Image (cartoon, rainbow, N blue to C red):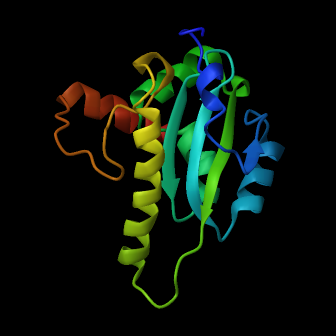
Amino acid sequence: MNNNSSDDYINGLPSVQEFSSLHLTTAVNAAVSALTDTAGVYFIKCKLTGMEYIGSSMSPSSHSGDHVLKSSNIHLRNAIDKYRLENFVFEVVEFFEPCSDITREENLSLLLAREQHWLDWLWLLPASVRYNFLLNAGSSLGVKLIKETRAKMNAAKKK
């Protein structure tokens, strides 16, 4: 097993829809269009290193463009800057169907539970194959950011 790449591990992570060539406006627009009015858990993977980021959204169409292009995850942002956007793919791990007879907050809680399932899987892997650094889906509890880091994160969102 090659510990420098997640290829040996990724076989356990399903992909129900993949979007690549994210450096092309047409590809980003196609992803946004395909994911409009959907919710789900997704991952962003560097094709060169095999490293991954797992997240979720009630609207992945916004995350396929925004999260990849303006990620607040500094590890992912630095990797995109270093390896270039064309070397990343955005993949949906699973779609989530919100239930109409419960609140948006309850639906979000259910979606975060699905993200947590996949984060638990990711955290079984070596740190060298993940961009996620928070153990819990939807929470930044316990993370203390210095003023400079917050400024860098805000700047990355504005790029």
Name the quadrant of the N terminus: top right
Q: Is residue 28 visible?
A: no
Tell me which corner region of the image, top left, top right, bottom left or bottom right, holds residue 44. Answer: top right
Residue 123, compared with residue 25, is above or below; it is above
Left or right side of 15 for 13: left
Give the image location of residue 87, x and y in percent.
Answer: 70, 23
At x 74%, y 32%, the residue is 23
Q: Residue furthest bottom?
A: 101
Give the image location of residue 35, x and y in percent.
Answer: 70, 61
Residue 123, compared with residue 103, is above or below; it is above
Residue 120, compared with residue 146, is above or below; it is below
Residue 109, compared with residue 140, is above or below; it is below
At x 51%, y 35%, the residue is 53
Tell me which corner region of the image, top left, top right, bottom left or bottom right, holds residue 135. Answer: top left
Q: Is residue 50 visible?
A: yes
Number of disc labels: 0
Viewer-nearest residue: 121 or 139: 121
Give the image location of residue 101, x and y in percent.
Answer: 47, 91
Viewer-nearest residue: 125 or 62: 125
At x 36%, y 38%, the residue is 154
At x 41%, y 34%, the residue is 73
Give the image location of residue 150, x and y in percent.
Answer: 27, 34
Left or right side of 14 for 18: right
